[in-house]
Amino acid sequence: MYSPAKAGLFRSPGNLSFPSDFMDYWVAGFLFLTAGILLRPWLWFRQDQDQEEEEKEKKKRMIPKGSLGWPVIGETLAFIACGYSSRPVTFMDKRKSLYGKVFKTNIIGTPIIISTDAEVNKVVLQNHGNTFVPAYPKSITELLGENSILSINGPHQKRLHTIIGAFLRSPHLKERITRDIEASVGLTLSSWSQLPLVHVQDETKKMTFEILVKVLMSISPGEDLDILKLEFEEFIKGLICIPIKFPGTRLYKSLKAKERLIKIVKKVVEERQVATAERSKLPANDAVDVLLRDVNDGGGSDKQSQPLDFVSGKIVEMMIPGEETMPTAMTLAVKFLNDSPVALAKLVEENMEMKRRKLESGEQFNWSDYMSLSFTQNVINETLRMANIINGVWRKTLKDVEIKGYLIPKGWCVLASFISVHMDEDIYENPYQFDPWRWDRINGSSNSNVCFTPFGGGQRLCPGLELSKLEISIFLHQLVTRYSWTAEEDEIVSFPTVKMKRRLPIRVTPVDRASPI
Ligand code: HEM
């Protein structure tokens, strides 16, 4: 039988001869020990590497599934094609059924994770730890500038958001602005009734801009407002364009318009600053007052070195979120009501009832009267659920984030898609049906805040939420209690933004609704 000892490979201690045999063992032991010492870190390193690999694999598996499509264009064409159709969520629905509620794709050369999951969207919106920063196309970032309220993150954003939100919700503003909105809406609708045809989308835009500028800087209709509107329109044309900046390009023209716009606003701010000291005891009348007082009180930190530029810039930025959203919501409400005579009849009934009560008591309407029109609020909610111009928000992650078992890797873009949740048939029964009554069933249910987010949520929840609802309520109230209309055939398109293909042409007629309908 083979024995290593016999073969002389190992020797038993009995055969040892000192010193050479002993040295052999000593050397062998030394080598063994050294190898062990040297190997151990390597083994540890290997073990770490294996663990790292395993971790990487695990993380890779947690990245939402999906397809990045073709090189460079990714899945952009499919995304745009669905946007042009009557069902823009088809793009999401198709991928949702293949990969789950959170999936990855590539749009315009950007790898992006799209969430159609209400709970994931909530975490993105809440943004604990400031992990998600707003991500806009390059043209928007160029036009807004890096310190815009819409793109900054952290304490400055929180401060601005708080002071602007507090002002827009203040009883003083609500009282003053209710009268201003009533007057603007009254004049606008009366002018509509004298025209053979009105394009609701264009006309509501004029009216809502007028109101917005009143809220922001107290400018009344007139030459200044007209110039401001022209420059603003030129400015926002560049928000979605090819981001090339030299004379003649769209972006260049828009940046120039922004300079002129800031100059006009700065004049108003300058005049106001002179009067600020004597007005400091009075409640703020508009956003210029709010921002000037904050700057004078030491808020706004580094931006105080140029207070006039800072305040003027913020006023211009605040024109953006309210400008398209409001007229779109009003136009779509008219469209949905036009297509749903039963809902329209109920709306007329509720508003006439309130009007009669107010006429009898001789009181004016106040903000809470409009808010108490529950069916009217249902109509507004249902309109915003079905077709909101802000159909989701875009963010970028500053570090790896894990939500509900999904990993969103650092640096990736995330689209928290509101419209996918709003049109999810597991959440809303018959989601494509305009059904304002559903809100009587939904309101108060535990997840209604999570599943309905037309105004966003968390740190960036729209500060204009209450003002928007007031404005739309007043518009609907006056429209349905004083006029009737017939609409021409039109349809909603969703790309690049939600709007009516033919700008919703209608004919408006005054009606006497003195007698109950
Ligand atoms: C129907 C009308 C409106 C809708 C649907 C709407 C929706 C939204 C949404 C979804 C956001 C969040 C954006 C994000 O998270 O990135 C937002 C932000 C904002 N909205 Fe509105 N909005 C409306 C009207 C208005 C109006 C009338 C104003 C101004 C008076 C306004 C001022 C703002 C501002 C300043 C922000 C930025 C807040 C921040 O980032 O801190 N919005 N809006």
Image (cartoon, helix red, strand yellow):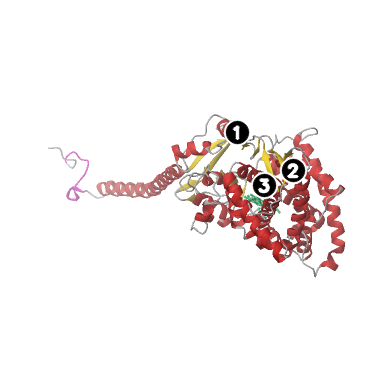
Going by the numbered disc 3, the residue's amino acid type is Met
Going by the numbered disc 2, the residue's amino acid type is Glu
Q: Write down the residue under mark 1.
A: 84
The picture places residue 229, in percent across and down from the top left corner, at: 80, 45
- Look at the image and tell me whether residue 194 can be seen: yes
The picture places residue 158, in percent across and down from the top left corner, at: 65, 59
Question: Left or right of 17: which side holds 325?
Answer: right
Q: Write down the residue under mark 3.
A: 330
Disc 2 from disc 3: Cα separation: 10 Å
Q: Residues within 10 Å of mark 1 (few under 14, many from 20)?
A: some
Q: Residues within 10 Å of mark 2 (few under 14, many from 20)?
A: some
- Badge 2 or badge 3: first in the primary sequence: 2
Disc 1 from disc 3: Cα separation: 21 Å
- Badge 1 or badge 3: first in the primary sequence: 1
Question: Left or right of 102: which side holds 169?
Answer: right
Quadrant location, the N terminus = top left
Q: In front of the other: label 1 or label 3?
A: 3
Q: Nearer the viewer, residue 407 or 87?
A: 87
- Badge 1 or badge 2: first in the primary sequence: 1
User: Magenta region, mostly helix, strand or loop?
Assistant: loop
Q: Nearer the viewer, residue 403 or 445?
A: 445
Q: Write down the residue under mark 2.
A: 203
